[in-house]
Image: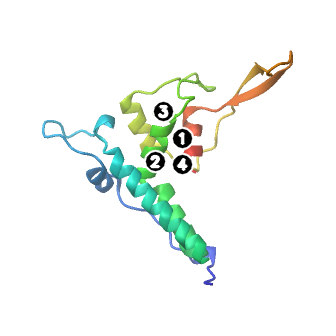
């Protein structure tokens, strides 16, 4: 088993967003702007899955240093951020639930901006507390609803 010092690991900046966008987005001939609807989701999911598979293999082999490098690469990668935002804003059951900020849904342009700015270093805002009924009882229990940004960061992690 290879031992790795955390301080000896190089920092990974990953690929530039422009390069990744050229690979991930199908550009139309009429418009050079990137749009949410133009993203090739099959290739995004494939890229994320391949990296997750490499992380699994490195963990199974006991290579902690390689596992941490790959995890950093995944978290900083644009494909993983796009997929996290998509799952939160479109695929998730609670996609129309508002958090503390009151935002229920995002436009396609706002989704791209969220994916660009998504990072795990941001301190999360407090959750909105809603009291809901317990099934079959008169009592209530608290339910915390985080903002869309926090939910996307949790999905990325």
Instruction: Indicate the quadrant where residue 110 lies.
Output: top left
Q: Earlier in the sequence, mark 3 or mark 2?
A: 2
Asked whether, in this view, residue 53 is left or right of residue 132, the answer is left
Report the disc number at residue 152: 1
Residue underneath mark 3? 89
Q: Earlier in the sequence, mark 1 or mark 2?
A: 2
Q: Position of residue 37 (x, y in %)?
A: 31, 35
Q: Nearer the viewer, mark 3 or mark 2?
A: 3
Between the C-alphas of marks 3 and 1, the distance is: 9 Å
Between the C-alphas of marks 1 and 2, the distance is: 8 Å
Would you say the residues marked 1 and 4 are in contact, meaning their CB atoms lie under 8 Å apart?
Answer: yes
Would you say the residues marked 1 and 2 are in contact, meaning their CB atoms lie under 8 Å apart?
Answer: yes
Q: Residue at x 44, y 55 (%)?
A: 48
Q: Earlier in the sequence, mark 3 or mark 1?
A: 3
Report crowding for label 4: few under 14, some 14 to 19, many 20 or more residues within 10 A (C-alpha). Answer: many
Residue underneath mark 2? 81
Q: Position of residue 69 (x, y in %)?
A: 52, 69
Between the C-alphas of marks 4 and 3, the distance is: 13 Å
Disc 3 element: helix
On screen, residue 94 above or below 10: above
């Amino acid at each position: 088993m290879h031992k790795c010092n955390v301080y000896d690991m190089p920092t990974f900046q990953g690929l530039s967003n422009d390069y990744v966008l050229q690979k991930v987005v199908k550009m139309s001939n009429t418009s050079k702007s990137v749009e949410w609807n133009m993203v090739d989701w099959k290739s995004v999911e494939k890229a994320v899955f391949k990296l997750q598979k490499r992380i699994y293999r490195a963990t199974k082999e006991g290579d902690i240093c390689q596992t941490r490098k790959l995890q950093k690469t995944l978290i900083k990668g644009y494909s993983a951020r796009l997929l996290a935002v998509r799952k939160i804003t479109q695929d998730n059951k609670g996609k129309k639930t508002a958090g503390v900020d009151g935002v229920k849904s995002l436009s396609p342009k706002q989704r791209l901006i969220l994916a660009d700015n998504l990072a795990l270093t941001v301190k999360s805002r407090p959750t909105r507390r809603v009291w809901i009924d317990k099934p079959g009882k008169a009592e209530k229990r608290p339910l915390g609803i985080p903002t869309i940004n926090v939910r996307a960061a949790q999905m990325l992690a």
